[in-house]
Amino acid sequence: MIQAVAVSLLAVAGFILALWWTNIADIARGIVGASMAGVAALFDNQLSDDAKEVAARRAGGQLILGGLNLAGRIVVALAAAGLPILLADFVGLVPGSAVLDVMLRLDYIVIVSILAFATVKIVNRLRRTDAAAENSGPQYSPVDQFVHNLAFSGPGVQKMAARAEARLIPRPPMPDVSQPIFVTSLARGGTTAVLNALHDAPEVATHTYRDMPFVTAPVLWNKLAGGKRRGVRRRQRAHGDGMEIDLESAEAFEEVIWRMFWPERYKEASIPLWQAGDTNEQADRFLQNHMSSIIRARNLQAGPQSVEKTRYCSKNNANIARIPYLLKSFPDCRIVVPVRRPESHAESLLRQHNNFSKLQTQDNFVTRYMADIGHFEFGNLHKPFLFSGMEPTQKDTHTPDYWLQYWTCAFRELLEYKDRCIFLLQDDLRASPQATMEGLYDTLELSSDGQSFEQYFHSKPDVAAAEHFDPICLQAAQDVYEALEECAHRNLLRNVI
């Protein structure tokens, strides 16, 4: 009996080692990836019919070859398992039939399975030592990519998801949305840090990464995706700025809705501004319901013992191009605009433009992901907003003066609404974050609840080399900045600076 057990364990070890040696797990993942890629291509609204057919054929060929490859490795593993049994029988140590009888016993199968599972988990944990891999940003498996491509295969899918949530999820009357908060600026202006600081206000509800990819049905998707059981390790986001994210992190997904109702605005190389007369009543109703849905989703996730969330807050850099529209459609809204020194802001935009141009060239899914959520701020997807005076074709986007001109045109436009926007200077957020954010909380009528705001903002001065820019362009930008600085201190910080 002991000899039969020993030989059987050698057979199991041979089987496992052969599977490991032949790298069967990667082969299996490749088959799943090919399958998902083929199906996802059929839902990709950015591909032509011919491209979809080519992708499906390629995936079919990969599945056939992968299946044959997998079968060959399984045969090798079975041979490795059978070798010690045959040798033991050949030398007369123990009959092969006795070894097989032991291996087919239920208690043997259960015990060996548990031991094998525990061994694999321990080995994987010991091998998980590469810190860079742990913090290199979100990683999307083939299944993740398939679900994402399905969710963004067309605007009808997101609308259908919202209708499904309204019908399938029992709900009390939708919560009223009053005084929604829109955080906006040019990208790299500090909107994410301000959003995170506002996200901690007990009454504030924001989008989180948990809402992706069915951002229009946050309650339904959270239930289908496993609720709080679904999680990922905190990772650095792709911007390379050291900011870490997980599923609970606040993020900007509202632009998905704007693209649903104004798809024609995103088709050209530049995006025209929204004016008050562009109002779309259907879009306004959808946005109002969506704000209520986000508030409800965050209340459900927080639990009945938490302070009720009543204020919708979004970070959407693209809202900088639709200030008059927001003021007309949501007259009680609060628009918060972080403002960074022009030379520092332009330098950061150029750096991220180069960074994402490289990332999008290397990984097609990064391109698809950013296009789907409406991030056209930089990279190969860059589509500038047509602020007055902005002529995108006259300058190279890989030069600092392009981004400085973009900054000047954008914020000169915002000065027209200086009495309706709340300007926050990046310099003040760095030098005195507590006083600045407490002032903002008071202005927005939020409960600060004793939060410490230093954690959200860099403390080092925000400086850049002025000699990199054309002196005339830089002076024009600095004139606009001085006007914004006066507005910020007069309207928000006069009591704390």
Image: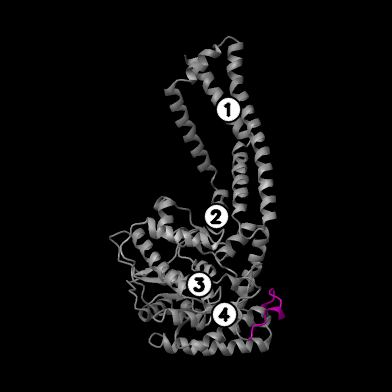
Query: Seen in the image, is 37 located left or right of residue 203?
Result: right
Secondary structure under badge 1? Answer: helix
Counting from the top left corner in percent of width and height, residue 99 is at 52, 16
| Total numbered circles | 4
Answer whether residue 392 is magenta in the image: yes
Counting from the top left corner in percent of width and height, residue 67 is at 64, 36
First along the sequence among labels 1 and 4? 1
Tags 1 and 4 in contact by the CB under 8 Å rule?
Answer: no
Query: Seen in the image, is 206 located left or right of residue 137?
Result: left
Span of residues in magenta: 389-400
The residue type indicated by label 2 comes to Leu
Q: Comparing marks 3 and 4, which lies closer to the viewer?
A: 4
- Say which residue label 3 marks: 316
How far apart marks 1 and 4 lie (CA) works out to: 64 Å
How far apart marks 2 and 1 lie (CA) works out to: 38 Å
The residue type indicated by label 4 comes to Leu
The residue type indicated by label 1 comes to Phe
First along the sequence among labels 4 and 2? 2
How far apart marks 3 and 4 lie (CA) works out to: 14 Å
- Say which residue label 2 marks: 150
- Say which residue label 4 marks: 273
Q: Comparing marks 3 and 1, which lies closer to the viewer?
A: 3
Residue 259 in the image: above or below residue 400: above
Secondary structure under badge 4? Answer: loop
Tags 3 and 4 in contact by the CB under 8 Å rule?
Answer: no
Tags 2 and 3 in contact by the CB under 8 Å rule?
Answer: no
Q: Comparing marks 2 and 3, which lies closer to the viewer?
A: 2
The residue type indicated by label 3 comes to Asn
Q: Residues within 10 Å of mark 4 (few under 14, many from 20)?
A: some
- Say which residue label 1 marks: 15
